Image (spheres, rainbow, N blue to C red):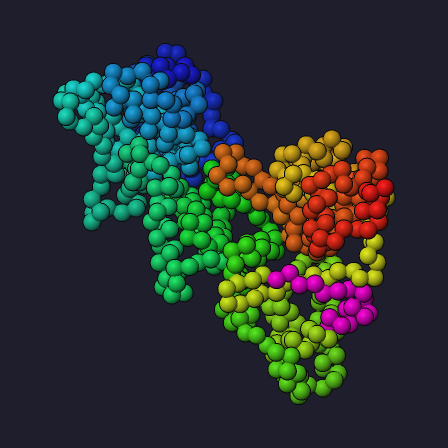
Amino acid sequence: MSATLTGICKGLPVSPLPVYRGRDPLIGHAPTRAHGLNATEQKTALENALRYFPSSLHEDLAPEFAQEFVAHGHIYMYRFIPDIKMRAYPIGDYPCKTKKAAAIMLMIMNNLDHTVAQFPEELVTYGGNGQVFSNWAQFWIVMNYLSEMTEEQTLVMNSGHPQGLFPSHAEAPRLVITNGMVIPNYSSREMYNRLFALGVTMYGQMTAGSYCYIGPQGIVHGTTITVLNAGRRCFKSGDLSGRVLLTSGLGGMSGAQAKAAVISGCIGVIAEVNKEALVKRHKQGWVMEVIDDLDQLVTRIIMSSKQRKRVVTVQDDSEEDMEEVSQTQTLTQAQKATANLSKDVINKMVSEVVQYMLIMEQKKIPIKRTDINKHVLKDNSKAYTEIFRQAKERLKNVFGLEVTELELTATKTKSKVYILLNTLDADTHSDFVDMSSEEPRMTLLLIVLSIIFMNQGEVITDALLWHILQKLDINCDEGKDHEVFGDVKRILTVDFTKQMYLEYTKIPNSETPIHEFRWGLRAHKEISKRKILDFVCKVYDNMRPENWNTQYREVIRSEGGREDQETAGTSNA
């Protein structure tokens, strides 16, 4: 079988028959079709498939096609899948007599492109059953007809079957198509399934069987309008900044939902059970990030909400949480709420809040007011401010931990997220590069933060970071654990992101998926940039910090513009 455009336009290859290669196990395939045909009807389906081939080949092809029918509920003729990269080639590359025919060829091959079609080997472009053709024999015959078509001919198609080239004129359509010719009032899903199995009809959806599929972009406008109108109806506002659109589906049409969320200004969270569909939309740029951890998703929503200047929550009781967060409770109000509670009850609640915060900090999960109320205080949430004040004092006086606030600001409300910082030993991480440390993950984190900080712009692509870590003999390959750190790639892209030490985001509209790393909110609070720069200086044989002009200025800026006197004196010496 020829792997050229000229070759696929020469007609159905029958002498010799192409080698049977079977289905590609690395791509998605259509589910087995229910047909309901009896033995006689199954024989008819086989005869309908064999009609495209010389009778001399029927003995060879009949058992193969029969097996396909039993296995998949339809005869797709996998043997005749063209051995060519299926895509839309430049229109001038197609062998034809009229550019209009070349345009049709281009659209057909675009509909069957593996990066476009849902089930390319079953000739399904989208929707689960949107067929371009019923079988691959039809593809070959149609491509041959189109290569021979003139401006005085019209190709007539009926549910994937080419009826032939008919004389017409230059002003007539070059192509006339009918698909799924059944009468709704006198048909049913079962009847359609039988007719499709027989090979006499097919469902072409809107743009699969008419060869003009353009992907989710064809529906993104309408989806965006729907999202905006939903916002106007539910929130009485066209401003969806920070709102969460929670939906599902990343198929050929529903893939537009993610982009519609971006255009509308809200945060889109789209669930998808089909990994192949998810990966395809991510590679195409319709989806910006892929997250498979619920806690990490919640953290990412909070961070995105902060960037978009509005508070969101994804709990089931989100309306109650939003109402609670929007209210400003004074200390006096909280004290009144605790007035009727005994000292023992208050101490118990304070202890439970402290214990909860210590557990969350141990897991490096940001602590939220709504979570404390929901999981600890519950019916006593009105006493939150007073209980939280006492819990903060106990954490500082007993454990040496400072409760530090990471504030996510909105136009009218404030949602507060907290972390705990060690105040007993300010030099905890001064000698952090210690491969024998009991906390090797912290060592890895600080190495990565050093690399990011020293990179121009304090941001680094994932590819460059992997390259630098490999140079340091820190293996980042998937499936291969580092002997000290473990699964480096997962720790950096999942664990540290969830803990807010790192931000890991996809660069929008990149042709191939490119991600960037930045310092996370927790890293900015817990880790001194001066110590990072001092460490780098030691690595470079005690080079002075001022030699890195950009990074040194950032250190001074992060410290409020006050230059360290000892460093300044050394510099002036």
Residue 422 is situated, as x and y percent measured from the top left of the image, at 78, 60
Name which residue lies at 35% across and 36% down: 214
Q: Does 337 sit above or below residue 307?
A: below
In the rendered structure, the answer to whether residue 81 lies left or right of residue 47 reads right
Q: Quadrant of residue 427?
A: bottom right
Residue 387 is situated, as x and y percent measured from the top left of the image, at 69, 76
Residue 36 is situated, as x and y percent measured from the top left of the image, at 34, 41
Foreground residue among 299 and 10: 299
Name which residue lies at 35% across and 58% down: 229
Foreground residue among 115 and 470: 470
Q: Is residue 358 magenta?
A: no
In the rendered structure, the answer to whether residue 379 lies left or right of residue 571 reads left
On-image quarter of the C terminus: top right
In the rendered structure, the answer to whether residue 116 lies left or right of residue 459 reads left
Q: Quadrant of residue 321?
A: bottom right
Residue 392 seen: yes
Name which residue lies at 58% across and 40% down: 515
Foreground residue among 502 and 377: 502
Q: Residue furthest front?
A: 572
Q: Residue furthest bottom?
A: 340
Q: Tell me which segment is drawn in magenta.
A: 391-407
Q: Is residue 399 magenta?
A: yes
Residue 492 is situated, as x and y percent measured from the top left of the image, at 67, 44
On-image quarter of the N terminus: top left
Q: Quadrant of residue 424?
A: bottom right
Name which residue lies at 39% across and 59% down: 238
